[in-house]
Amino acid sequence: MNFVTRFAPSPTGLLHLGHAWSALLAWRRARELGGRFILRIEDIDTGRCKPAFEPAMLEDLTWLGLDWDGPVRRQSDHFDDFDAVLNTLRDEGLAYPCFCTRRQIEAEVAASQSAPHGLLGLIYPGTCRSLDETERLERLAAGENHAWRLDAGLAAARAGPLTWQEDGRGVVEVDPLVGGDVVLARKDTPSSYHVAVTHDDHLQGITHIIRGEDLHPSTHVHRLLQALMCWSEPVYTHHGLLRDDQGKRFAKRDRALTLRSLREAGLTPEEVIAMAETLAERDSAVS
Ligand code: GLU
């Protein structure tokens, strides 16, 4: 069986126990099935990502006993690839420039009765979708700050009904409007997570995506982009997130449970893995 999976952390901090669990699930599956396990650094958000975390992540994964196949792909080296995706969507009439500031969007959403707040956060009210072409061109020519957004309604109509395969759990119906007109690119971040991740999953021939359930809502957007770009469809697993004793999921701000701090506290890789397994079992027992 052709099995290619990946672990795709963003270097915004050190890896914590939750990351280790996600990486381990994907790595184990690849090794069990004689497949490939790829490591990708998702650092397109150059404001939040710090280059120093990248070698630290690689070192921590190696310490844990994980190895990966082929070179590590660093997304910030490939902005041109993501730009090409944006161009395709623009050429197809599926992307439009949005000149709204975050504050304007928040004010508009607050003023509207329905206050649309989706699974992916604030739903853009669509203000710039209806700008006429002349105004768009004038504002672009004047160099006004803008983002590019997906016209999700049009994209959904173009793509038709979509589903994805959730490994071992059957078929999930895609709600293409779950995130509304999501951002595809910004001035300061010339690609969005959604564009970069789907592009690279396709480019790297990822057949199985194993990642935390916090990204389940994003998968609706990813399936839509895959369909629009005629990219192949991976099988997904969204695993439960490890939680602390208060039931809060681990985050990069929880310094105590970074792999680095556990290792410095004298734990062995086997003990760290056992700790992650215990937490995962505890959570699946209560859910
Ligand atoms: N880079 C994303 C993160 O660190 C994960 C992307 C993915 O697995 O699809 O949250």
Image (tube, rainbow, N blue to C red):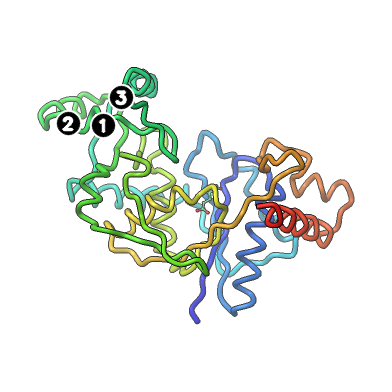
**Which amino acid, mark 3?**
Cys
Residue at 32%, 33% in the rendered image:
147
Helix or strand or loop: what does disc 1 sit on?
loop
Residue occupying the point 30% across, 24% down: 100
The one nearer the camera, 171 or 219, is 171
Whether the residue carrying mark 2 lies under 8 Å from ligand 1 is answered with: no
Amino acid marked by disc 2 = Ser
Check contact, mark 2 vs mark 1: CB within 8 A.
yes
User: How many neighbours does mark 1 have within 10 angstroms: few (below 14), some (14-19), or many (20 or more)?
Assistant: some
Going by the picture, which residue comes out furthest to the front? 286
Tell me the distance, in whole angstroms, between the alpha carbons under discs 3 and 1: 10 Å
Q: Which residue is mark 3?
A: 100
Q: Amino acid at mark 1?
A: Gly
Where residue 126 is drawn, which disc sits there?
Answer: 1
241 with respect to 130 (left or right): right
- Residue 180: quadrant of the picture: top left
